[in-house]
Amino acid sequence: MISPKYFREIPQRYRLEAGKCKKCGTAYFPPRLVCPECKSKEFTKVNLSSEGKLLTYTIVRVGSDKFSQQSPFAVGIVELKDGVRLTTQLADVEFDKLKIGLKVKLVFRKIQDEGKSGLHCYGYKAILI
Ligand SMILES: [Zn+2]
């Protein structure tokens, strides 16, 4: 069975939906209930740009249980054009080609199979552009 958390996060996982503060304009991903900058509780829903740059990365050689079959894989922190930073897996990359500052794009990919039924869970991963 897919967890309720996965369903709650579908707008972010599938469409990169963020909350943009109506008062100060800061975008938050995932969305927040209160803006840490100005304490406003009013947000508009925005879809983030899928393009950004790689701020840093690492190679995971021994993944946790769910990701052990995908090891080794690269994980990075990406800053999108909107200024939002997120952690994501870097897909379809040769590790020796990775460099801080490279341009990346978020794409829709299968993340993992969940539970005994093996249902596919989808989300975003970054590829080099
Ligand atoms: Zn604000």
Image: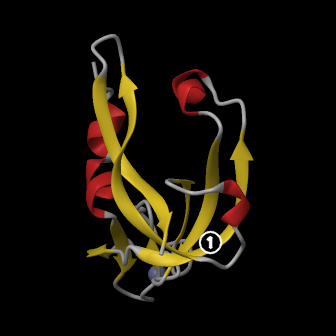
Residue visible at 34% across and 84% down? 22
Q: Residue furthest bottom?
A: 24
Residue visible at 58% across and 21% down? 65
Query: Is 62 placed above or below 103 here?
Result: above
Instruction: Residue under label 1, please give it.
Output: 54
| Kind of residue indicated by mark 1 | Leu
Relative depth, front residue between 88 and 61: 61
Q: How is the image coloured?
A: secondary structure
The part of the image, by quadrant, that contains residue 115 is top left
Left or right: residue 103 versus residue 7 is: right
Residue 92: percent from left, percent from top:
50, 54
Residue visible at 45% across and 89% down? 24
Residue 48: percent from left, percent from top:
36, 75
Query: Is 10 placed above or below 17 here?
Result: above
Residue 85: percent from left, percent from top:
56, 69
Q: Residue furthest top?
A: 116
The part of the image, by quadrant, that contains residue 8 is top left
Residue 11: percent from left, percent from top:
26, 55
Q: Secondary structure at mark 1?
A: strand
Other residues around mark 1 within 10 Å, as few (<14) / some (14–19) / many (≥20)? many
Residue visible at 62% across and 33% down? 71
Figure quadrant of the N terminus? top left
Left or right: residue 110 versus residue 27 is: left
